[in-house]
Amino acid sequence: MPTIGQDISNRAARASLKHALDLARREAQADAAVKFSSYLDRVATEMANQELSAVEIVELLRQGAENWKNEGLSCAGCC
């Protein structure tokens, strides 16, 4: 049975780990948002410069969505 001191120490360690994991999640979400925003901006500029039709734009967006999905799935085992 842990002593009171050990129990307090264990709680503090768990809280610290939880805080570190929460911070890492928030940073990862922020990084993903910036990366996706940059991607959308780049694609929008490319579409405007090429004067694509609505059908071509939809197809490019679908291809981009598939690429993002595959990138996320390939990283699923990384964490």
Image (cartoon, rainbow, N blue to C red):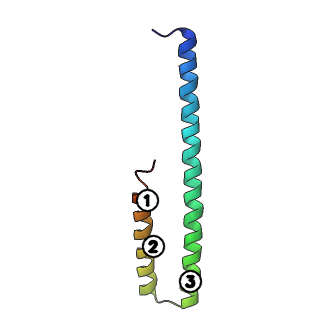
- Taking the spot 40% from the left edge, 59% from the top edge, the residue there is 74
**Disc on res. 72:** 1
In terms of depth relative to the viewer, which is nearer, 2 or 29?
2
- Taking the spot 52% from the left edge, 8% from the top edge, the residue there is 3
Query: Is mark 3 in CB contact (under 8 Å) with mark 1?
Result: no
The residue identified by callout 2 is 64
Callout 2 amino acid: Gly
Crowd band around label 1 with a 10 angstrom C-alpha radius: few (<14), some (14–19), many (20+): few
Q: Earlier in the sequence, mark 3 or mark 1?
A: 3
Residue 38, relative to residue 75: is it above or below? below
Residue 67 location, x and y as percent?
43, 69
Query: Is mark 3 in CB contact (under 8 Å) with mark 2?
Result: no
Crowd band around label 3 with a 10 angstrom C-alpha radius: few (<14), some (14–19), many (20+): few
Using the numbered discs, state the Cα–Cα distance from disc 2 to disc 1 in whole angstroms: 12 Å
Residue 30 location, x and y as percent?
59, 55
Q: Secondary structure at mark 1?
A: helix
Callout 3 amino acid: Glu
Please name which of the two marks, 3 or 1, marks the residue nearer to the observer.
Answer: 1
- Taking the spot 57% from the left edge, 45% from the top edge, the residue there is 24
Q: Secondary structure at mark 2?
A: helix
Using the numbered discs, state the Cα–Cα distance from disc 3 to disc 1 in whole angstroms: 23 Å
The residue identified by callout 3 is 46
Quarter placement of the N terminus:
top left
